[in-house]
């Protein structure tokens, strides 16, 4: 299943929430934001070929940590499709199919 959110309940302790990151710069910004708000947290780094960075907070601090998470994610925006060639290809396909659909609509309704 695809996860669109970067947090979940801790698998061993329901009183904790886990934020996870794929990029170190976002992870470090999140740590700085939590320290500014004096929110206690634990960290864990997992290396299974690619690094995954975890920050664990208590459930009662989740709302403030969520605001810090949003700030960290928006500070380091990453493109959805990082490869520029693939991005141009996908947009080209989209516009071609949209043009075919519009032409088909015009031809079938007006001619």
Image (cartoon, rainbow, N blue to C red):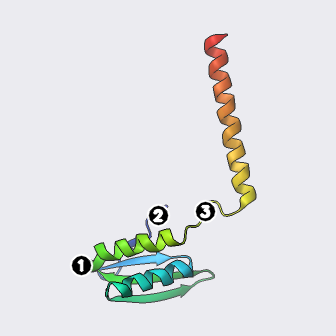
4 or 77: which is nearer to us? 77
**Disc 2 secondary structure class:** loop
In the rendered image of this protein, does residue 7 appear above or below residue 108? below
Determine which residue is flagged by label 2. 3
The answer for how far apart the CA atoms under marks 3 and 2 are is 17 Å
**Disc 1 secondary structure class:** helix
Determine which residue is flagged by label 1. 60
Mark toward the start of the polypeptide (2 vs 1): 2
Residue at the image point whose x is 51% and y is 87% from the top: 45
Residue at the image point whose x is 64% and y is 26% from the top: 102
Q: Which mark is residue 18?
A: none
Relative horizontal placement of residue 61, taking residue 111 as reference (left or right): left
In the rendered image of this protein, does residue 96 appear above or below residue 34? above
**Label 2 crowding class (10 Å Cα cut-off): few <14, some 14-19, many 20+?**
few
Relative horizontal placement of residue 18, taking residue 26 as reference (left or right): left
Quarter-of-image position of residue 47: bottom right
| Residue 10 image offset from top left, x and y in percent | 35, 79
Determine which residue is flagged by label 3. 79
In this rendering, which labeled residue sits more in front, label 3 or label 2? 3
66 or 46: which is nearer to us? 66
The answer for how far apart the CA atoms under marks 3 and 1 are is 32 Å
107 or 64: which is nearer to us? 64
| Residue 92 image offset from top left, x and y in percent | 72, 44
Q: Quadrant of the C terminus?
A: top right
Residue at the image point whose x is 68% and y is 39% from the top: 95
Q: Residue furthest left?
A: 60
Mark toward the start of the polypeptide (3 vs 2): 2
For residue 60, say whether it is visible.
Answer: yes
| Residue 109 image offset from top left, x and y in percent | 61, 14
The answer for how far apart the CA atoms under marks 2 and 1 are is 23 Å
């Amino acid at each position: 299943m695809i996860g669109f959110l970067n947090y979940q309940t801790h698998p061993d302790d329901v009183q904790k929430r886990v934020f996870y990151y794929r990029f170190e710069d976002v992870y470090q910004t999140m740590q700085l934001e939590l320290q500014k708000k004096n929110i206690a947290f634990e960290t864990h780094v997992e290396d299974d070929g690619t690094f995954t960075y975890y920050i664990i907070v208590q459930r009662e601090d989740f709302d403030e940590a969520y605001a810090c998470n949003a700030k960290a994610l928006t500070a380091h925006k990453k493109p959805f499709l990082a490869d520029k060639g693939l991005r141009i290809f996908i947009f080209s396909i989209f516009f071609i199919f949209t043009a075919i659909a519009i032409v088909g609509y015009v031809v079938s309704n007006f001619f």
